[in-house]
Amino acid sequence: MRILIAEDDEVLADGLCNSMRHSGYAVDCVKDGQSAKLILSGEQPFDLVILDLGLPKLDGFSVLRSLRDNNRQVPVIILTARDDEGDRVKGLDLGADDYMIKPFSLPELEARVRALIRRGQCGMNPVYACGKLTFDSVARRTMIDGVPLELTTRELSVLEALMMRTGWVVSKEQLLERLYSYSEEASNNAIEVYIHRLRKKVEPAGVTIRTIRGLGYVIDNLHSQAS
């Protein structure tokens, strides 16, 4: 899952980024409206946007209007100090899915993020299974036979990408996109490290992660491979 945070308060933006990354999301952060509009008009898909209204260069209303005019249906939470009823009505009318006033409760924001992602997956099964291994993409929880599996946030993101395409090859480039923001340095070696760790943790579930040379990785049920 990938989130874009558009917030010009550097301290708040850093706090939000750290919180979302700790929850297992890949996060990109921009500090002005023009950058937000540019990144949202690109090819990189986002699962959710947290949008401030008082952004420099281009305000949040304009960013939201551009997003919806381009028929981008990504869920948007407006996070702002503006508590005027007119601003709330305008934001919701422009297509925002939620509106929160600063100061806010971080646990409440995280709950609203999960709720919107769950809503965006309406019609889809947010729980993926392979062998005895299950992954709940909304709760960000992995289990083997109902017993929680301890994973780092990076390992969780890699596993999510693989389990969403069980039986299909996922390239290193696709994994890197899920793990790192544009501002973070990443290497293919990092992916190999996470895959190595995951293999050891998922084998008890009857699951294997195979390397397809030159293409990427695929997660499979060991029993289906044996047959």
Image (spheres, rainbow, N blue to C red):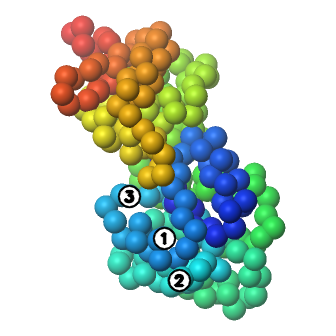
The residue identified by callout 3 is: 45
Rounded to the nearest angstrom, the CA distance separating label 3 from label 2 is 21 Å
Given residues 147 and 198, the one toward you in this image is: 198
Which residue: 58% across, 21% down? 149
Which residue: 21% across, 10% down? 227
For mark 2, give the secondary structure.
Answer: loop
Looking at the picture, does residue 180 appear above or below residue 154?
A: below
Front position among marks 3 and 1: 1
Residue 5: where, in percent of width, then height? 57, 62
**Marks 1 and 2: in contact by CB < 8 Å?**
yes
Looking at the picture, does residue 156 appear above or below residue 43?
A: above
Which residue: 48% across, 36% down? 157
Seen from this angle, which residue lies furthest left?
A: 214
What mark, if any, has residue 4 been given in the picture?
A: none
Asked if residue 205 shows in the view, the reply is no
Left/right of residue 191 with respect to residue 57 in the rendered view: left
The residue identified by callout 1 is: 36
What mark, if any, has residue 58 been given in the picture?
A: 2
Left/right of residue 165 with respect to residue 50 in the rendered view: left
